[in-house]
Image: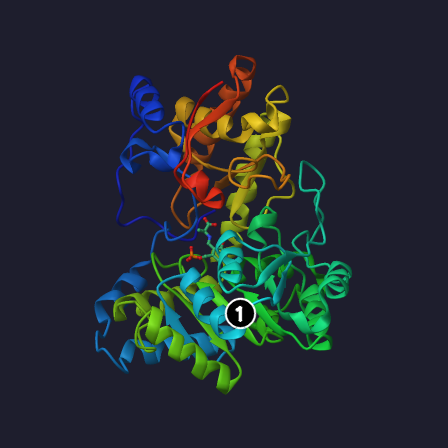
Amino acid sequence: MRSYKAKSVTSIQLPPRERRETVLTEAGHNVFNLAADDVFIDLLTDSGTGAMSDDQWAAVVRGDEAYAGSRSFKRFRETVADVMGFDRVVPTHQGRGAENVLFGALLDDGDVVLNNTHFDTTRAHVTNQGAIAADCPAETDLTTDTVGTFAGNFSTDRGWDAVEEHGQDAVSAVVLTITNNSAAGQPVSMANIRETAAFATEIDATFVIDACRFAENAQFIKQRDPEYADTPLSEIAREQLRPADAITMSGKKDALANIGGFTAVRDAALFEQCKQRAILYEGFPTYGGLAGRDLEAMATGLREAVQPPYVAERIEQVATLGDLLRDRDIPIVTPTGGHAVYIDAAALFPDIPADQYPGQRLVCELYREGGVRTVELGSFAFPGTNRPELVRLALPRRTYWHEHLEHIAETAARVRDRRDEYSGLEIVWEPPMEELRHFSAELEPV
Ligand code: F0G
């Protein structure tokens, strides 16, 4: 059941099949190159694509656009303190801006950063500082029916291996990404957060939480850890962030806004460094590259994200999409995570080898069959990493209805029925930076 109703809507339409064929070819079999108007159901990302509430829109109108010390910043700062427990906050234009500000202040050339799994932009910003990004996931085999209760956890055993390999002095930061986007959006347990914090303290590293989907993670803790079954969601949300020395946040996820981000820290000296970097890269530290109205939207969204039943319904919607797909024999990673369903394209198309991008073929066919846009997160997006051939169906927040989910599942079922017709794909053009190729490379059928 949804605890909200629509009062403003955007029309969408399924273009005729012929048009879908044409634009897919023109896009070089890369759905990032499609015009959004040619997409019927857009599951490319859950980032900045959700519906804002009327309270958020009302807050937008209240935005105070003063360059320094705006009323909107004050309200935003008080909200971050209330909802997330951090008094020292620097707004940024989005999550990667927060990563740039914080990691630039924290890291030196040759440092090592450990993470349960680095998200792409996090890895890129660590590397950009001359540091080394090492993943320490507890669960490495994310395919169908292999995932446990808190499969996003950090492995301290792997952490210790990394300390041995690089030397304790080199490891300057330990990051926990909650939920773990690059591990199928799986949650991290409260016990693991504490264990990872203790590990960071023991090796004298700064403990950072990438809190983009902190409300979703808190909801999983409430559902799956009996100790927290009766704890209010807002308390769990704060408690999971308490051990962190710093957080980075994309307001486009669990602040329910279309743009924005921030970093927040405990230490006064680090705060000062972050503010100076913000002035250089983002803007004066009371607006951070945003308009006052964006700070208002984030502040209102942060409170809504931890106000039941919003996030319980969101996770349930993702699980429902997973069930509809499974009912049609589509192999998905289970249990589903917080923001997306991940289809195992290698299991769906066993005859397409990894170097012919079975995931990207699936992405193309979901669009061709039903105008559904998704994203490949396998060999095409992450060259040379041996990642499973997953395709992500990310659900924007408060945006689609059950009928849309049924259309997605029916589309996937039609693709499954025709699976013997599909060949692999080859790249015919790619940009100079291989790590960024999936955003713009062009492909053709083999
Ligand atoms: N950290 C995580 C875990 C993320 O998922 C993202 C963005 C970021 C940091 C960067 O935030 O986009 O505001 O700069 N993830 C989006 C996605 C893009 O589609 O998963 P940003």
The local secondary structure at tag 1 comes to: helix
* Residue lying at the far bottom of the rendered structure: 268
Could you tell me which residue is drawn at 55 percent across and 17 percent down? 419
Could you tell me which residue is drawn at 34 percent across and 77 percent down? 285
Is residue 161 placed above or below 325 in the rendered structure?
A: below
Left or right: 59, with 112 as reference point: left
Is residue 260 placed above or below 276 in the rendered structure?
A: above
* Quarter location, residue 378: top right
Percent of width and height locating residue 30? 40, 32
Task: Please state which of residues 417 and 313 is positioned toward the viewer in this rendering.
Answer: 417
Amino acid type of the residue tagged 1 in the rendering: Ser
Percent of width and height locating residue 20? 33, 23
Q: Which residue is under mark 1?
A: 234
State how the image is colored: rainbow
In this rendering, does residue 402 appear at all?
yes
Could you tell me which residue is drawn at 63 percent across and 65 percent down? 112
